[in-house]
Image (cartoon, helix red, strand yellow):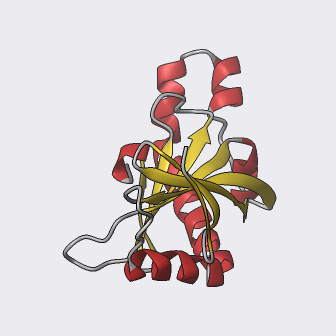
Amino acid sequence: MTRIHDELFGELEYEKKFWRGEMTIKMFNVERKIWLSVDGHEDADFSNVQRDAFRNFVQSMNYIISEAEKEVYAYYNENVDEYREILEEELQENKIAPKIDFLTRLAELVKPTELIVRRVRKNGKRRLGLLCDVSWEMEDGLGIKIEDEVVEEVGYQDIVL
């Protein structure tokens, strides 16, 4: 495995078309260590857009995460009844997809696992994807699509993969 120390991204190891390292974020008032994955070739020639995307995220992390939390809360509340119907058992419903009144309750249900710094496309947007494991969707998880420091979409992880 190829390893590097990048001035911005830190210690990274090349694995399956991504450079992977670690970082810490605070989401739903819980600090967690997550994977940092930078989309790139083995030569580690990251674009300025990728660097700007990550640098801007780090500088505005509290604001961006706060907006992401609100969007996840809205997404959850829009879909929770559907998830509860699938489960059928009340005990399971209340554990896996409980009705919640406060955003902070999501800390028990949503666990961020990885921030992906995507390659630049023709539109030149700074693209990030925040992946989360969630209690109600074990297979597909949750993805938070961030473009130019704005939370654009919340849904299954495939929206950012």
114 lies above or below 63: above
Residue 19 in sight in this render:
yes
Q: In the image, residue 30 lies at what x, y percent?
A: 80, 57
- Answer above or below: position of 90 versus 64: above
| Left or right for 127, reference 116 | left
In this view, the residue in front, 69 or 59, is: 59
Q: Residue at left 39%, top 63%?
A: 118
Furthest toward the top, the residue is 89
Q: Is residue 156 visible?
A: no
Which of the pair 78/36 is nearer the observer? 36
Give me the residue at 56% from left, 65% from top: 68
Name above or below for residue 136 compared with residue 154: above
- How many dots with numbers? 0
Q: Residue furthest left?
A: 122
Residue 54 lies, in percent from the top left, at 53, 75
Image-quadrant location for residue 89: top right
Q: Quadrant of the N terminus?
A: top right
- Residue shown at 64%/50% (left/top)? 112
- Residue 128, horizontal then vertical, whole percent: 45, 65
Answer with the quarter of the image where residue 25 lies. bottom right
Pick the front one: 142 or 102: 142
Taking the image as shown, residue 46 lies to the left or right of residue 35, namely left
Does 8 sit left or right of 52 as displayed?
right
Q: Quadrant of residue 46?
A: bottom left
Q: Residue furthest right?
A: 30
